[in-house]
Every structure is written in structure tokens, then in C-alpha cells.
Image (spheres, rainbow, N blue to C red):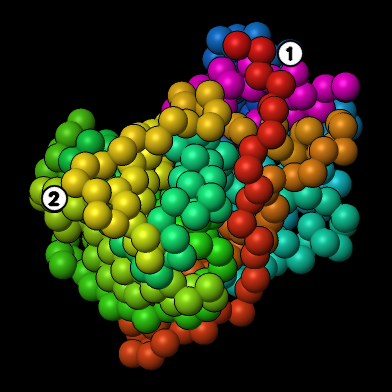
């Protein structure tokens, strides 16, 4: 098995976990990193013993790099993605695929034109928690799934992030920030979405940074901060989903799947582990299911390994670019349905990822 050379664009906080995890797998070798702040790229290269710190342009043009991981801010995902694909390299990007549905379609169209692979986070759906949840449904533990709930309820980014403006601009908000985790999980468990009906609102037009040197500075909110909707899945199941930056406290579950013979409690889709709980009809207590894999820690980068395994060994891909595009359209659907006061019928298709195979992790 040969190693696939990888380059990383974006050396901010999240790059550390990607770089740490890339060292654990036989399929990938990070040969370069880049950032608009070149000194930050130099620091990351030194920290993780990466051979080259480059400019963004140099990394995209590097002849020995096959996969580029884009960890740039979301509003740059489309632009960087198109540049990477135009240069003849495969693309793995942090979520979302783009900040607009049209932008996401352009990225996938460019990949098809060039005969290249595209995928996007989250890859938490390859972790033990969501894989076990999928397996439980496939085994019929709760019968036929008929309904689901998914809740992301937080008080806002400005409480902990020193520069939170983007989260309140177009392409931000709770849906584009955290929606990919919840929607990817629901699609993993229930299949593709047929239509969406939703309402969205901005509770406060002005917010104020709560920490750091800019504490007290005003943020102009330009995107909905509370979205509530209903998703009709092609298999007949109906899900209720809320994403919010307007909730100070909650006791709601992350995700639950309701079936004809019981209920499945799904772990936080922003994590890789459990617990996964089931309560069948007539039972008094919840039962915790044994996890079907050891992928329980923060293994961001499994999606890159999936792509590299295909390139180096020809193993079937668990994930494909159609999933993040379907997720992106669903997020677009929440906003569009609210604006038009009507159902939004999905136009994209996707196949839920298969259960994860051996990844060659060395630890």
C-alpha cells in the first residue's frame, strides 16, 4: 500500500487535530501546509514535523500533492475548492462544502469535469457512535423508523469566540455552523431527504462579544439565529429539527430515532463515540448498545483516510461528495422554505455512507 501525499490549507486551531490524526494512519502523509499568515504555517510545520511550509498558491501548485485538505473559513471553501480542483488535485474540505447551494454545485461540477474526488466534513458519521446507531437500525432493533428529532440548542458563539462575526453573517448561523453534523447523521440513519418545511428568525439584530480584547463590541446579525423545521425523508420517516443560537438552557436530546418497535437515542453527532441507547416497546429501562468499532476519540480526518484508501488501494469509499451537497441543499432549504412560506422539494440525491471498514490506524 502506498501513502497518498496530502497538503493542508489553513493552519488555525482545527488544523492541529487533523495533523495529529493524519500521523496515525498508514494511507496518508502530510508533506506541506499553508496559510494566508505564512508564519502560522511555519509554526505548524515545525510543530508537526511537516517537510514544507508554503504559500497557498505554492501548495495548490505542488506537483507531489494528491489531496488538499481545506481548513479555511467557510466563506472561502468554494473559492479554494475550485482552485484545488482546477489544479488537478482531490479535495477534502471542512464543513460546509460551500456557503451557498449554487456554490456547492459548482464545486462538484468542477470535480466531475476534472475526474477528481470531493468530500467534506463532518466525518463523525464514520465514528463508532453513529456507525453503531446505523447498525442498530439495519438490524431492526427499533423496527421500521417512522420519525426522528434533532436539536442543536445553544446561546451563541459570542460567549466563547473572540472573533465571532462570521457566525452571524450570510453562510453562518446555527444551521450552517452545526447543521452539517445533525443533517449528516439523520441522512446516515434515515436516508435521503424528500422535502423540507421550516421557519427561521433573527431574535436579536445586535449581539455583543463577551470575551477577549474586543469584549463589548457590537456584532451586526445578518442571518437567522433560530431555525425550526420538518424534514420528510424518502423512506417515509418525518423528522423535527431545530438549530438555535437563542437558547440559554435545554434538556432536549441531541438525536432520537423512533421506530415501530422502539426508540434509539443517538449520541452527539459532533463526536465520534457513544453512548447509543435503545428502549424497545414494553421495556422499562434503556439499554446501552456495545459499540461496533473502536473509533471513539476525536478522529477528524477519517474522511481523508477514506479518500486516500480508495486512491491507494481501490477500496470502496464510505463517503462521497453527493452527501455534503445533499446536506448543503437541506440547509439552503430551511432558509428558502421560511422565505417562501412553502415546502422546499429537494433536487439532489445521496446514498448514506456504508459501515466503516478497517482504516489502518496504527494506534
Q: Earlier in the sequence, mark 1 or mark 2?
A: 1
Q: Note whether 123 is above or below 200 in the view shown.
A: above
Q: Quadrant of the C terminus?
A: top right
**Is residue 322 at least partly visible in the picture?**
yes
Query: Residue 241: image x %, image y %?
Result: 32, 65
Q: Which residue is pictured at 15% across the width and 40% down the height?
A: 210
Q: Secondary structure at mark 1?
A: loop
Residue matched to label 1 = 51
Q: Quadrant of the N terminus?
A: top right
Q: 168 or 326: which is nearer to us?
A: 326
Q: Which residue is pictured at 46% across the width and 65% down the height?
A: 144
Query: Residue 320: image x %, image y %?
Result: 70, 53
Q: Secondary structure at mark 2?
A: loop
**Is residue 265 at least partly visible in the picture?**
no
- Inspect the magenta stretch and tell me whether residue 84 lies in it: no
Numbered tag placed on residue 250 in the rendering: 2
Q: Residues within 10 Å of mark 2 (few under 14, many from 20)?
A: few
- Looking at the rendered image, the disc whose residue lies closer to the viewer, 1 or 2, is 2
- Residue placed farthest to the front in the image? 282
Query: Residue 350: image x %, image y %?
Result: 65, 65
Query: The magenta stretch spans which residues?
Result: 1-29
Location of residue 135 (image quadrant) = top right
Q: Which residue is pictured at 63% across the width and 43% down the height?
A: 355
Amino acid at each position: 500500500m502506498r501513502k497518498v501525499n496530502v497538503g493542508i490549507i489553513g493552519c488555525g486551531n482545527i488544523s492541529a487535530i487533523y495533523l495529529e490524526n493524519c500521523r496515525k494512519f498508514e494511507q496518508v502523509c502530510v508533506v506541506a501546509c499553508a496559510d494566508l499568515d505564512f508564519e502560522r504555517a511555519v509554526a505548524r510545520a515545525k510543530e508537526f514535523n511537516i517537510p514544507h511550509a508554503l504559500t497557498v498558491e505554492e501548495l495548490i501548485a505542488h506537483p507531489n500533492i494528491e489531496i488538499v485538505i481545506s481548513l479555511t473559513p467557510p466563506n472561502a471553501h468554494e473559492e479554494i475548492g475550485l482552485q484545488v480542483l482546477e489544479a488537478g488535485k482531490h479535495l477534502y474540505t471542512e464543513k460546509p462544502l460551500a456557503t451557498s447551494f449554487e456554490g456547492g454545485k459548482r464545486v462538484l461540477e468542477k470535480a466531475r469535469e476534472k475526474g477528481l474526488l470531493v468530500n467534506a466534513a463532518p466525518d463523525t458519521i464514520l465514528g463508532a457512535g453513529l456507525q453503531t446507531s446505523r447498525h442498530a437500525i439495519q438490524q431492526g432493533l427499533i423496527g421500521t423508523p417512522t420519525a426522528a428529532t434533532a436539536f442543536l440548542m445553544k446561546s451563541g458563539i459570542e460567549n466563547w469566540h473572540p472573533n465571532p462575526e462570521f457566525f452571524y453573517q450570510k453562510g453562518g448561523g446555527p444551521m450552517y455552523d452545526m447543521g452539517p453534523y445533525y443533517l449528516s447523521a439523520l441522512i446516515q440513519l434515515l436516508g435521503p431527504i424528500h422535502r423540507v418545511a421550516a421557519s427561521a428568525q433573527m431574535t436579536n439584530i445586535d449581539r455583543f462579544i463577551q470575551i477577549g480584547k474586543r469584549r463589548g463590541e457590537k456584532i451586526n446579525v445578518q442571518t437567522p439565529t433560530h431555525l425550526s423545521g420538518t424534514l420528510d425523508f424518502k423512506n417515509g420517516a418525518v423528522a423535527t429539527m431545530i438549530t438555535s443560537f437563542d437558547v440559554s438552557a435545554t434538556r432536549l436530546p441531541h438525536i432520537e430515532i423512533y421506530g415501530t418497535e422502539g426508540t434509539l437515542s443517538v449520541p452527539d453527532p459532533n463526536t465520534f463515540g457513544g453512548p447509543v441507547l435503545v428502549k424497545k416497546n414494553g421495556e422499562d429501562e434503556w439499554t446501552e448498545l456495545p459499540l461496533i468499532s473502536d473509533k471513539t476519540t476525536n478522529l477528524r480526518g477519517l474522511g481523508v483516510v477514506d479518500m486516500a484508501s480508495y486512491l491507494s488501494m481501490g477500496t470502496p469509499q464510505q463517503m462521497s461528495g453527493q452527501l455534503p451537497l445533499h446536506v448543503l441543499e437541506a440547509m439552503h432549504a430551511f432558509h428558502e422554505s421560511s422565505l417562501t412560506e412553502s415546502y422546499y422539494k429537494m433536487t439532489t440525491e445521496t446514498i448514506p455512507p456504508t459501515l466503516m471498514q478497517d482504516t489502518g490506524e496504527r494506534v
